[in-house]
Amino acid sequence: MKFKKITTIIFVVLGATSATADENGQNVIYLGSGSAKSGDPTTTSNKSPFTVGYLRLSNSTDTVIGGDISGEGTMLDSSWGQNHAVKQATSFNLLLGRNLGKTENSRFDASLILGAKEKTRSCPASYLGYQCYADAKPNTSYGFNSGVALTWTYKSALIGLRATGESTQAIIGYRF
């Protein structure tokens, strides 16, 4: 639970520091979808991965910073009385990058993706229909998530590719 609070604080700070675009940068929101890592269906989630993210592109420096939340990879869920059900994991990621080239109307950026991905969720079974015994919160463990994102923006449109150890996704976005 502490991890989700820290992630929320990071996204609020990113949003607050760049709530409006100025002459030194632009804000980008993006969505992504693609293909998951394949494997045994009894141990690997087969759901299509997705991403919702934010980037801050700086004009005064070549820095790119952002964050995204993605449904990617596999989590084993032992809540709701299940015995290690295979579910899609959620990852919380920070993007740090640099501009590789720009013109008056476009730019090409590369970012490193660093974050955490859910691995397991477990708790004692409830006999009254709750997710966990006595309606307690489940224990969630996290693993490391990493990858790269390559984006190209032209005027207000963004297209790109986001690849991690769990998925490969095409991304589209809007720069404002």
Image (tube, grey):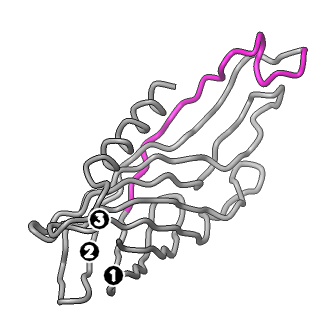
The quarter of the picture where residue 71 lies is bottom right
Q: CA distance from mark 3 to mark 1?
A: 14 Å
Secondary structure under badge 1? Answer: strand
Sequence-earlier tag: 3 or 1: 3
The quarter of the picture where residue 175 lies is bottom left
Using the image, determine if residue 22 lies above or below residue 109: above
Q: CA distance from mark 3 to mark 2?
A: 7 Å
The quarter of the picture where residue 104 lies is bottom left
Q: Whole-percent x and y of residue 174?
A: 43, 74
According to the picture, the residue beneath numbered tag 2 turns out to be 109
Q: Are marks 1 and 2 in contact (CB under 8 Å)?
A: yes
Residue in the foreground of this view, choosing between 176 and 98:
176
Indicate whether residue 146 is drawn in magenta.
yes
Position of 110 compared to 139: left or right? left
Q: In the displayed orientation, state which residue is furthest to the bottom.
A: 104
According to the picture, the residue beneath numbered tag 3 turns out to be 111
Q: Whole-percent x and y of residue 76?
A: 68, 38
According to the picture, the residue beneath numbered tag 1 turns out to be 153
Sequence-earlier tag: 1 or 2: 2
Q: CA distance from mark 1 to mark 2?
A: 9 Å
Q: Are marks 3 and 2 in contact (CB under 8 Å)?
A: yes
* Magenta-tinted stretch: 128-147
Q: Amino acid at mark 2?
A: Asp
At a point 57% along the width and 38% down the height, the residue shown is 119
